[in-house]
Amino acid sequence: MAATGELIRLINYVDDISTTLRRISASIPLMDVDERKKLAEHMRTVGSNFNALVSQLEKGG
């Protein structure tokens, strides 16, 4: 099965997310406690959306 242009674009988006997560990880030591808490809260919200999307993909729709 050949990858469509859209699939390649979506995979690139996921790669961009991975790169962003590495950048965030590298910044954590420079953040104070409140900044880390706020970022963690925001990421938890987004993470639940991410997990829901993965489940949707696995279920086929």
Image: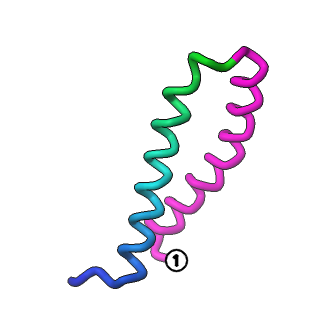
Is residue 43 within the magenta segment?
A: yes
Give the x, y percent position of residue 21: 50, 40
The image quarter in which residue 28 lies: top right
Counting other residues with Cα less than 10 Å from the Cα at mark 1, is it few (<14), some (14-19), or many (20 or more)? few
Query: Relative to residue 52, is residue 43 depicted above or below?
Result: above
Q: Which residue is mark 1?
A: 61
Give the x, y percent position of residue 3: 28, 80
Residue farthest to the left? 1
Side of 15 relative to 34 (left or right):
left
Q: How is the image coloured?
A: rainbow
Task: Specify the amino acid type for callout 1.
Answer: Gly
Q: Nearer the viewer, residue 40 or 5?
A: 5
Side of 37 relative to 55 (left or right):
right
Side of 14 relative to 40 (left or right):
left
Q: Nearer the viewer, residue 57 or 36?
A: 36
Residue stretch rendered in magenta on the structure = 32-61
Give the x, y percent position of residue 23: 50, 36
Is residue 45 within the magenta segment?
A: yes
Query: Relative to residue 1, is residue 29 depicted above or below?
Result: above
Determine the residue positioned at 71% across, 15% down.
32
Determine the residue positioned at 55% across, 34% down.
24
Name the quarter where the N terminus is drawn: bottom left
Side of 8 relative to 37 (left or right):
left
The secondary structure type at the circle numbered 1 is loop
